[in-house]
Image (cartoon, helix red, strand yellow):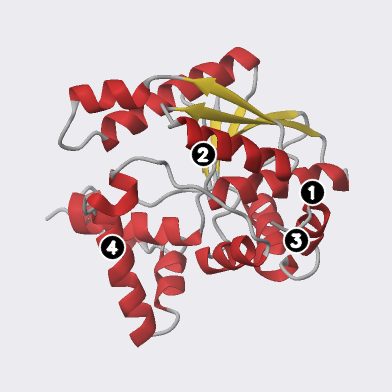
Amino acid sequence: MKDVKEIEESLGNVYKKPIWSKFINAINDFDLIKDGDKIAIGVSGGKDSLLLVKLFQKLKKDKSRNFEFKAISLNPGFKDSDLKNFKSNLEKLNIDCEIVDTNIWEIANAKAKDYPCFLCAKMRRGILYSRIEELGFNKLALGHHFDDVVETTMMNMFYSGTLKTMTPIVPSTTGKLALIRPMVYIKEDSIIDYTKKNGILAMNCGCTIEAGKTSSKRRETKELLVALEEKTPGIKQSIFNSMNNINLDYVFGYTRGNKNDEK
């Protein structure tokens, strides 16, 4: 891994346009950070969340906004070697992160052996949200990027029959905790390049599902989009743009309830 100072500086030069500027643009376009916000950053140890923390660190140093942030991670039951590597990564990247120990994997695998991912994700959210609220934070920042938005949009159409995407901000329904995604403009290729060029050893979630031993609809959708992008460059950008360019007059679910259409 490169020296942390060199990694941080790369966000202001080499990756200013593909990463830093897009991070700032998303914050401005969707008003993601307000004066006095206390923001928790969900850290999995993967490339996306590690980058998100570095972006917030740089934003804090710029002193252009008045906010607080804290990195928080859940240990769902990592092997000792994985946990050691994770902590080593955090130290090398100068990331101060609270790690909450849990036995989520053990419970999820016991209750849903065939496909524990849904239960695992639900439990992780519940524990993470509870801890964040205990700390008095009002926002949770997650590292979902451009490709996550496109893939989720298509998956909802393919497998759920819904026109729904992954939005940059999900307001709190209880008045306590809103969810923000400041990396929605950043493409995964840029994140991968930043991670590899800086020698950052990001980890996956550590389970057999994530390791590729079981097929997933998201993986299939990702592969399909890669093939479509190769054949028609810019198609992913068009899908992304479509979620910000909806003509409700031509959406069944909207026009069906319009009294002007009744006969």
Q: In front of the other: label 2 or label 3?
A: 2
Badge 2 or badge 4: first in the primary sequence: 2
Q: Which residue is mark 3?
A: 11
- Determine whether label 1 and label 3 are within 8 Å by CB: yes
Label 4 residue SS: helix
Q: Which residue is mark 1?
A: 58
| Most foreground residue, 96 or 164 | 96
**CA distance separating discs 1 and 3:** 8 Å
| Most foreground residue, 140 or 7 | 7
Label 1 residue SS: helix
- At 20% from the left and 37% from the top, the residue drawn is 115
Badge 1 or badge 2: first in the primary sequence: 2
Please indicate whether residue 112 sits to the left or right of residue 178 in the image.
Answer: left
Q: In front of the other: label 2 or label 4?
A: 2
* Residue 172 rendering spot, x and y as whole percentages: 51, 28
Label 3 residue SS: loop
- Determine whether label 1 and label 2 are within 8 Å by CB: no
What amino acid is labelled 1 in the image? Lys
Crowdedness near tag 1: few (<14), some (14–19) or many (≥20) residues, C-alpha within 10 Å: some
Q: Which residue is mark 2?
A: 44
Please indicate whether residue 170 sits to the left or right of residue 16 in the image.
Answer: left
Extreme residue in the front direction: 81
